[in-house]
Amino acid sequence: MKKLLLFFLILGTISIHAQSQNWLLASEIYQGPDGILKWQYSYTTQGQINKVLYTQSKKLFYTESDFKTDNNNRVISFTRTYANGKTPTETVAFEYNTKGELSKFTTNIIKDGKPKTTILKEYEWATDSVIVYSGGKTNGYTKTIHLLNNHNDITKVKFLDMKNTETSDAFVFAKYDNNPNPYTLRGNYPDDDINAAHNKTTFFMSRNATATYTYNKNGLPVTSKINFYFPETKQTITHQITYSYLPLKP
């Protein structure tokens, strides 16, 4: 699962700036070392998110529902319910700054009707960067700095502790395509990580990696394939996602 989380950090999940949307992401199917995983998105007729289904090996794992919005149609909370009936339900909440940018993300894990654990992230936005404080700005334990170019794409991600000591190698993203990132096409669906406007094609971590995409006639990615090469074993590990879309009705 650690490899999967790294893969989605590479892809990104929060839109830095909203794009003009004529299409909505309907589903994504991941295939790789972590098996086959699927996310399905449902929307209102106005293109606002109202349900997410997540399955592992064709078995429902959790459902996100009960989406609530503010007067600007930004999601302020939803509920995540696990299919096994044993994992505690989670309530996820979002706060925004005066520019409409995400400023706080909290997840409350509910057990026996009471919050058991709270996961907190806070965000600090600038013209050319976004800092994510895991645990919050006051009592946080790590911060992640995303450096941005003038195309709203991420050029570098740095990982530091709260004393500004780097805790691991930085990610460097060298090249992007000019096509919309599928994760910017989820209506008003929010998440807790940072997303580029376009799709990364060349990047460097502790080892080099490349990504390739196929596109439909509307210029939207329908597959993404990321290859990690391990020279010590001469092995290539491939992660692939297939995307489908719905038209946004006027």
Image (cartoon, rainbow, N blue to C red):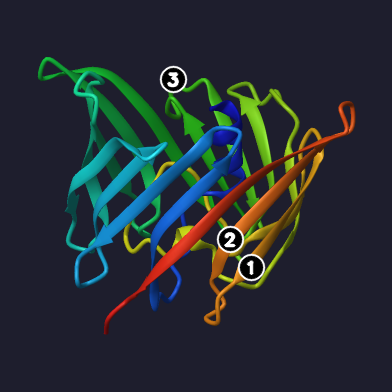
Q: Residue at x 56, y 44 (%)?
A: 31
Q: Residues within 10 Å of mark 3 (few under 14, many from 20)?
A: few
Q: Residue at x 89, y 26 (%)?
A: 232
Going from the N terminus, do you reach mark 3 or mark 2 first?
3
Q: Which image quarter holds the C terminus?
A: bottom left
Q: Residue at x 40, y 54 (%)?
A: 101
**Circle on res. 223:** 2
Q: Which residue in the protein does label 1 denote?
A: 214
x and y percent of residue 18 in the render? 43, 67
Q: Residue at x 28, y 36 (%)?
A: 62
Query: Who is closer to the viewer here, 154 or 48?
Result: 48
Circle 3 SS class:
loop
Q: Nearer the viewer, mark 3 or mark 1?
A: 1
Q: Residues within 10 Å of mark 1 (few under 14, many from 20)?
A: few
Circle 2 SS class:
strand
Query: Who is closer to the viewer here, 250 or 104?
Result: 250
For marks 2 and 1, give the CA distance: 5 Å
Going from the N terminus, do you reach mark 3 or mark 1 first?
3
Circle 1 SS class:
strand
Q: Residue furthest bottom?
A: 250
- Kind of residue at badge 1: Thr
Does residue 4 appear to the left or right of 113 in the view shown? right
